Image (cartoon, coloured by chain):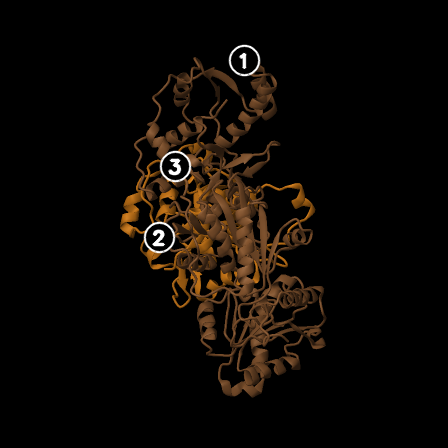
Amino acid sequence: MGLTHRPALDRRFWELKGYPFMDLVSPCLNLGTAFFLQGYVEERWAAARYRLAKVDSILREASRRWKVPLARRPAPAAEPLPPEEEARLVGRVLSGRILLLEEVGRALGENGVRVTGELADLLHYLYLQGECELWPAVGYDARGVPKCNRCGQGDKLYRASCGACGSTHCYVCEGCLELGEARTCRALYARPRSERDGLFPCRTVSPVLPFSLTRAQEEAALEAKAFVEEGKSPRCLIWAACGAGKTEVAYGALAAALSRGKEVLYTCPRRETTKEIYRRLQQAFPGVEMTVLHGESGSKYTPAQLVAATTHQVLRCYRRFDLIILDEVDAFPLAGDARLYYGLERSLRAGGQILYMTATPLPELAAQARRRRLPVIYLPARPHGYPLPEPQIILARSLRRPTDQLPRQVAECLRTTILEDRASLLVFVPAVDLVARVVDGLLGCREFEGLGEWVKGCHAALPEREEVLEAFRRGEFPVLVTTTLLERGITLSRLNVMVLFAHHRRIFDQNTLVQIAGRAGRTASFPHGKVWLVADRITPEMAEARRIIRSFNRLAFRRGYLEPTGRR
Amino acid sequence: MGTMGRRDWLFVKGRECFLCRRPVAAGHLCPSCSRTLEMWEQEFRPCRRCGRLLRKEYTAELCPQCQEKLPPFRLARAVGPYRGELRRAILELKYRGRRSLAFPLGYLLSRVVAEEPLYGRPQAVIPVPLSSRRFKERAFNQSALLSEELGRFLGLKVLDRVLVKERHTPPQAGLDRPARLQNLQGSFAVVESSSVEGLDVLLVDDVLTTGITAAACTVALLQGGARSVAVVTVATSLC
């Protein structure tokens, strides 16, 4: 049993295989419904040991159960099959991908492949040969509940009348709409990458670095390399301190995989980080075929051994990679988004490995690591060899009252930062509307009036956000009030950090606090940056964040990674 | 309409703003979107006939275009100008196919109709149709989705197969007024006259720019026997 959009092709194909006759089950249905009913009927026919006499009764039963009038009728006369060679070329382009029909067309164009045959027929021919898999973009599970076959989710489906298939029950997935419309009546074509599509050659690949790794990095890189070379474990976690240089550690695993001709994916949730990683990978692995995939990238279907991609783009990959390096596994939008994890798992080849990298693993991952179900590579020290700044908790009872007056200790921290440390201060607040209020409150400190416009605010909805950030980086003003928007990805040479209203547990969980604390003390010129948590009480999250940072410092000390001058 | 699992019944999600999806304490719109949607009223007011937006300093009740020649529809109104969140929402719905936006936009349309006494009591909602080719390409008609939701909010029947576009035409966007007029001439027709005969009809579209599409549909509906046609759109242009 199979599905077809043109029965005459199937007839020819099966005639050549030695099957003298073929029946068609009508009426013509949209792909999702047809796929579901095919599965239902086939299951029952298999139970009846594929006896032809049973087909009609099974169809009658299915018609009653699913209220679709199914009936057998003779198939139309055979038509010639599409060119074999062209089908092979299409198959090669599709290798390791899961694409809609028009995406296959784009992929062919991008790879300079021209075909004369109808693309849908070529793909169907591949499907008949068992060379590609075919699903409705939105299908139904065994109970008849609709589900998107691209992102794996069922909670963002919208049912409407469809102009393309004419059905009144055509579902559209809005969960992965940015990749093109996945609908019940649209086909997804998928083909796992395999030897027949050609593999990359085995050769020695080693990263080119403009600096030497520290002992901590070297040891971690060797462990990462061993993880790939031994291949004993399917998953591994690099649990690194913020600013410890975990990307360089991943190069060990990358080089080992590339040397064996494996295809590798380096993926991060955010576009900007992906672009940055791509630049760094290009410098570190100059001879390797590489591509970058994100929403704005021009080419999306170029073959490459090393792919840097945002996690969204991975939804177009199918059984392709032998190694996936997942950076910032806990960052938005990956954290809590099941469809992206679904895409990652599906893009992995059988026997492939995933290397997670983060400073703040999600609770499930941390729990697996604690139970020793997940091997962990620790990288507890920064390259400069100084311990991570530990948060100082400042209890300010006045924060309990609804007042615009900031606690007096805040002014003390400002004095330390601006007058003693000659550093900048990043003040985190839990809500956007607090940014302006805290800026006003800080401007009330008269002693810094001489500095001109010395404090500014920045949040996601601010149109001139980039300009404000750039000015802060340039040191044009010393204090920036912001939301958790800047918890990652900002590095300043002399920086202290303050979290105001740190007792807001929903916003400032332990991972956020560890990331925020990780902004301070990142450079050798100012390794003892200060971290202040200003709150009306010590929350479990604050205590846990402090414990995590302390445990990193203890581990670094035990392993002898800290500089003698850096020890406190 | 989205699918709802057992889990969604047990763990009801917090309210979200219809437009920006930020959490809201009460109502359907967050304060920021409400402000944005109402802010235009400080600067502009609608032309009494075509609903396109006039600066407040402009004293006449009708826009220059309506003074020159009144459109065939009784009146037209919109939720707001074609910019900001509204523009974003229309583009998302129309070109990226985010069909779930039809629900909030339909709600906003229903508010416009309910708050404007000049609409009276329309008896049926009719969407501006797409040509069969465009409908097949896009797979949905955004005006039909909006009509469906509007009809649901107002308790009116939706006649989405009565008015058809018989001829495929290039998109109106990017054309000047004479070219737009030429483009749509004779392209709309009523296929079941009996269903609109004697009805006060509410014509629904996503954007009203020059009003030529709405006028062409109105002419077809009036010729098909409708008593009057009023227009409601999500956004409108500035005069």
Image depth: mark 3 or mark 1 in front: 3
Closest to the observer, B80 or A89: A89
**Disc nearer the start of the sequence (3/1):** 1
Identify which amino acid the numbered label 1 is placed on.
Leu
Residue B9 falls in image quadrant = top right
Q: Residue at left 45%, top 50%?
A: B92
Image depth: mark 2 or mark 1 in front: 1
What is the secondary structure assignment of the residue under circle 3?
helix
Identify residue for label 3: A92
For residue A371, above or below residue A27: below
For residue B6, above or below residue A533: above
Q: Are marks 3 and 1 in contact (CB under 8 Å)?
A: no
Identify residue for label 1: A52
- Give the alpha-carbon distance from disc 3 to disc 2, as whole Å: 50 Å
x and y, in percent, of residue B152 in the image: 56, 43
Q: Are marks 2 and 1 in contact (CB under 8 Å)?
A: no
Q: Residue at left 45%, top 40%?
A: A96
- Give the alpha-carbon distance from disc 3 to disc 1, as whole Å: 37 Å
Whether residue A219 is visible: yes
Closest to the observer, A58 or B177: A58
Q: Say which colour chain A has.
A: brown
Instruction: State which chain disc 2 sits on.
Output: B
Image depth: mark 3 or mark 2 in front: 3
What is the secondary structure assignment of the residue under circle 1?
helix
x and y, in percent, of residue A91 in the image: 39, 34
Q: Do the residues at pointers 2 and 1 share their chain?
A: no
Residue A521 falls in image quadrant = bottom right
Identify which amino acid the numbered label 3 is placed on.
Arg
Instruction: State which chain disc 1 sits on.
Output: A
Identify which amino acid the numbered label 2 is placed on.
Thr
